[in-house]
Amino acid sequence: MPADPYEGLESLSTEQPIWERFFTVAPLVLVGTQEKDGQPDVAPKHMAFPLGWGNYFGFVCTPRHNTYGNIERTGCFTVSYPRPGNVVTTSLAASPRCDEVKPIVGLLKTFPARSIDGVFVADSYLYLECELDRFVDGFDDNSLIAGRVVAAYADPQMLRGTDIDDGVLLADAPQLAYLYPGRFAVISNTQAFPFPAGMRR
Ligand SMILES: Cc1cc2nc3c(=O)[nH]c(=O)nc-3n(C[C@H](O)[C@H](O)[C@H](O)COP(=O)(O)O)c2cc1C
């Protein structure tokens, strides 16, 4: 290591957001909500993740998006995890609105959630029904929307089991990763993580 560990590093200005200067790996999900008129709304989100090890799920959303207002009004949302083959329709769910309507949503194949108001996007591999836990506002113009998972459904091919090796499972059913700010990857070639002996979470 050089005497000065900062030698050779570029200092990034925090006057501007830093996140477009490099790639970061994220998931990509479709959040489903219900509009004021009862119509479904669907929007892709990559800042989306489990909140802890319990059944909580959160994502980042600006209050300017209908998704935020819909959840504020209904107190619930759905999450569909798209397969890599559906990356184009997943992206199209971010198409702009015309006269307040997002026409693409009517073209997506959807089906209703069971215990909350909202729809899932068909041909996904994992589906969550969430009840709003809280909004955490104030990350500039963005908020964390935290939900409690009250129901979940999965394609059995994606479920881990004692009869199938995790590596084989992922090779057979690859995952979609979003590489912010504008690339994606299909993950099928994986390795077991080298956890330290005796590690506790
Ligand atoms: C790949 C991708 C990832 C996105 N991730 C997010 C996100 O994490 N948070 C967010 O607020 N918007 C995100 N967006 C933008 C919204 O999905 C988009 O503005 C959407 O049209 C908002 O819809 P709504 O007004 O119906 O809520 C993303 C868009 C794309 C294409």
Image (cartoon, rainbow, N blue to C red):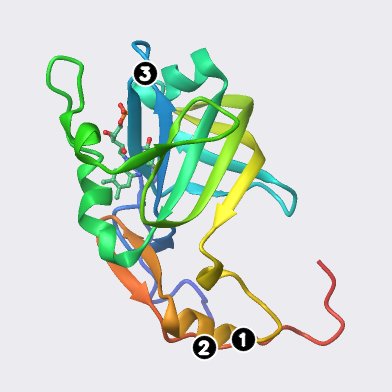
Q: Label 1 is placed on what type of residue?
A: Ile
Q: Residue furthest left?
A: 98
Mark 2 and mark 1 in contact (Cβ < 8 Å)? yes
Q: Earlier in the sequence, mark 3 or mark 1?
A: 3
Compare residues 28 and 37 and report the one nearer the observer.
37
Report, in whole angstroms, how far the alpha carbon at label 3 lies from the one at label 2: 40 Å
Report, in whole angstroms, how far the alpha carbon at label 1 lies from the one at label 2: 7 Å
Q: Residue 115: percent from the left, percent from the top?
A: 60, 31
Q: Secondary structure at mark 1?
A: loop
Q: Residue 14: percent from the left, percent from the top?
A: 39, 45
Q: Residue at x 63, y 83 (%)?
A: 193
Q: Residues within 10 Å of mark 3 (few under 14, many from 20)?
A: some
Q: Which residue is mark 2?
A: 168
Q: Which residue is mark 3?
A: 35
Q: Earlier in the sequence, mark 3 or mark 2?
A: 3
Q: Residue 54: percent from the left, percent from the top?
A: 75, 49
Q: Label 2 is placed on what type of residue?
A: Val
Q: Residue at x 44, y 48 (%)?
A: 80
Mark 1 and mark 3 in contact (Cβ < 8 Å)? no
Q: Residue at x 34, y 11 (%)?
A: 37
Image-based side of 101 in relation to 196, left or right: left
